[in-house]
Image (tube, rainbow, N blue to C red):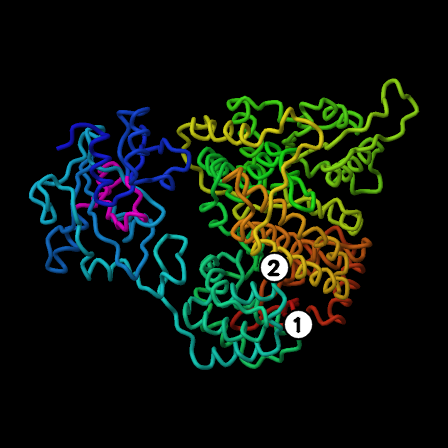
Amino acid sequence: MFASPLDAALRYASIGWPVFPCGENKHPLTANGYLDASIDPAVIARWWASKPNAHVAVACGPARLAVIDLDYDPAKSKDGPSAWKVLCEQHGRDLCGLIATSPRGGRHLFYQMPDDAVIRCRVDILPKSGIDVRGEGGYVLLPSPASPGREWRAGDPFDVDGDGVGDCGPMPGWVRTLLAVTSEQRAGGSSAGGVSHTVTPLSADAVRSIRSALAVLDSDPHDVWLRVGMALKSTGAQDQAYDLWVEWSQTSAKFDQKAQRRRWNSFKEFRFDGSEITLGTLFHLAREAGWQPQMELELAAEVVQPEPDLHQSANGSAPPTSDRESFPRDLLDSLPGVVGEMARWMLRSSPRRQPALCLASAIVSVGALLGRRVQTPTGLRTNVYALGIAETASGKGVGIKLPTRLFVAAGVSQLIGPSEWKSDAGLRAALADDARRSQVCLVDEFTKFLQAVSGPRAAGHQLGIKRSLLELFSCADGTWLPAAYADTKLHPAVPLAEPHLCVYGTGVPSELFASMDRGAVSDGFLNRILVFFADEQMPVRQKIHSSEPPIELVEAVRDLERRTRRVGDLHGVCRTVAFSGRADALLDQILDLSDARVRDYRSSSHPALADLWVRFGEHVAKLALIRAVSADPTAEVDVADVEWAEQVVGWTFRRLSAEAEDRISDSAVEAATLRVRRIVREAGPLGVTLNDLTRRTQWLRRSERKDVLASLVEAGEVTISTEVSGPSGGRPRTMIVAAY
């Protein structure tokens, strides 16, 4: 059928199927996997010239293909072909679609994806059926001489040109119905499983209750606008919920229809695991603004189904019910340039996938690569501090190990700085060599350092390191003046020009939260750090075929280093990267909104949080610069770069603020109050029993616990009641419920 794998790849590309090479175990051989798929003959020829025996894969989404994968594995009791045959018989049809065999006896059925629908990858569309789907975001191997056992089935009804390659025809109606894809669902995004959710319309009463709550909310604050949108998205009502969001958003002078739709599509679907914003978030915001609810309990029961178990588990830990915003995966999946390639490579190479942490490490590493070479018109450089937060053994170590491996392979190992600092003098010595003036320090357990320097018993050398880190963040475009030491021989007073330090650290939540007091915020240290929280503390383990950096990524790093290299690496030779007119206007708007946020917090019940947001615009400008230059060293910063940076920084700041609201305190009493309030809120609308609360706050004396509860009741934040447990009465119990 085909003379060679290259011949096959070119033939598929000629009919509009974007292809790319894969190695053994179906692992992509391009830097960005299926995202690199192309129909360009020159690109394809170059790929197979270096890998002549590579498998040919098609990116299903760009090809507008929906592929039914009928898996056959008797050892796992999977017989997809037989299960599909049963479905075909039920609908009076034979096996249909363009059919290819697989080496193990399975089948691939190729259909044209409907124009008004999107189909995403999904495993077992029916329980234990062995019927999988490959669509948007997925790929499949195609028949070629490199893939024995993969053949187009002879006599296929869509075998239009004699060799099985051609128009696979439209998807049959019953298949479309089985996959439940519609234009409405396409606008609403996908579920965790990969196929769009069924639309759940809101009742008239539900709409009235939502409008009543929205009527008291101001749509101008950006964070409120986002949280309301995500809350409405969580209902599953799709266009109906979107229209409510638009109706309310139009009360703001900042309303932008196109931006509104783009943000709506970026929101993740609600997962009933308590980790995402729900409709209860909207009601909570409205209550804080003075709303008097009439029917929120009925509404919650109607539109938030199935309901999670809000009771304490057997081990005493309640499922979280916080409104912490999940990491938007599209910020990584569609990220161009070296920073995107690097992040996705680390994600593929991690036994446990942590997309937010991989992105953080890539941003910091590329920031070091660009150090002392580019700057914004206001003199901001690409030095970034970031922190990846996840529990032990959850996959956060990849961001520490892999950047070193990549930079060594690319010949830029001089950028790798020390993994810890013993003193501020040691930190200064590490940057003293002009050739190593730009460094990335990859620091494991960085939260231990934060915890140590935040307490009243911080050692002098630790405080010295902290002071140096504070100074280094702000003098990348100037001179770092030396500290005064008595022994000038051991510590010579040598100013360092343009020191460019990037730091990526990791740590566990408990240590970060232990360092969250007003001092850590007000001294400006925490607002210099972009904190990336892992969404999953123990992601499902994936099989890793190789953690070696692909040659395409290595070459991309070398090319970026070469194209941004300073002339002789001379002091003051730093290219100023212009911002386009639209990008500059957007950045100005972001700065104005950031200033407004700071003012709002300073007049709120959490004034310390104002200090977290004072550097918001600075972080956005830095990340926009990194994204732009990483993709094209000759380009200016465009509006897409600023939008992406604002989304990344906004997500990190909102997550950190949400955590800090419950944890920042000036005293032990205030800290205890915040802790108890958080426990009660996390228990959900059913509340927590006094016995469970006592067990979880054993560090408090009885009188202290009583005083804390009394203060929370007086503030209107909790209610305490006595109820009889069990259907037939019995021993009464005291319940504490959050008043939100």
Q: Which residue is located at x 43 percent, y 64 percent?
A: 306
Q: Which residue is mark 1?
A: 288
Q: Is residue 415 above or below residue 343?
A: above
Front one among 402 and 61: 61
Front one among 524 and 391: 524
**Could you tell me residue 535's position as x and y percent?**
53, 48
**Could you tell me residue 381's position as x and y percent?**
66, 40
**Which residues fall within the magenta stretch?**
58-81
Disc 2 versus disc 1: nearer the observer: 1
- In which image quadrant can residue 416 be found? top right
**Could you tell me residue 600's position as x and y percent?**
72, 65
Q: Is residue 321 magenta?
A: no
**Mark 2 → mark 1, Cα distance in angstroms:** 18 Å
Q: Earlier in the sequence, mark 2 or mark 1?
A: 1
Q: On the rendered image, what quadrant is the N terminus found in? A: top left
| Amino acid type, mark 1 | Glu
Q: State the SS at label 2.
A: helix
Q: Which mark is residue 682?
A: 2
Front one among 421 and 395: 421
